[in-house]
Image (tube, grey):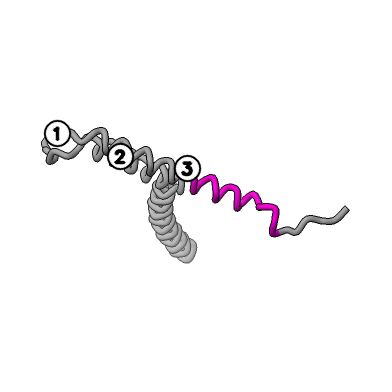
Amino acid sequence: MRPLASGLIPSMRQITQLLSGFFLLLVFAVSITFSYFNPTPIGLDIGLWQLSPQPVSVWVIGAFVLGGLLGLLLGLGIFRKLKSRAEIRRLNKALREAEIEVAQLRSNSLKNSKKQ
């Protein structure tokens, strides 16, 4: 039996990239079609803000993109890293305060032992 050339069989990474490319093309085609069939301008009121009228498709696609970006940020753990950094700063401050207190207690202990 003759071994197959490695260049002829696509790797899993290449298949994944190909499927991702097809998916992105499909999403692009659906968004273009959606934009074509939804040209009615709609204004949005968010609390005190009043946004200028845009086609419905702009609002829906914008919400989709914003949700995707927020999902990526949460998936990357950016918010978790920020929370961890704040916790590290708080703990470092508490450690410095504890070290100062220990140093003061040692100096007071040394003064008391010298007096006796």
Which residue was labeled with disc 3?
A: 23
As helix, strand or loop, the secondary structure at mark 3 comes to helix
Q: Quadrant of residue 33?
A: top left
Q: Can residue 116 be seen in this view?
A: no
Q: Which amino acid does label 2 sit on?
A: Ile
Q: Are marks 2 and 1 in contact (CB under 8 Å)?
A: no
* Disc with the residue nearer the chain's start (3 vs 1): 3
- Alpha-carbon span between mark 2 and mark 1: 18 Å
The vertical placement of 40 against 69, above or below, is above
> Residue 61 has which mark?
2
Would residue 65 be counted in the magenta stretch?
A: no
Q: Give the range drawn in magenta.
A: 7-22
Q: Quadrant of residue 71?
A: top left
> Residue 45 has which mark?
1
The vertical placement of 58 against 100, above or below, is above
Mark 3, Cα crowd under 10 Å, few <14 / some 14-19 / many 20+, is few
- Alpha-carbon span between mark 3 and mark 1: 33 Å
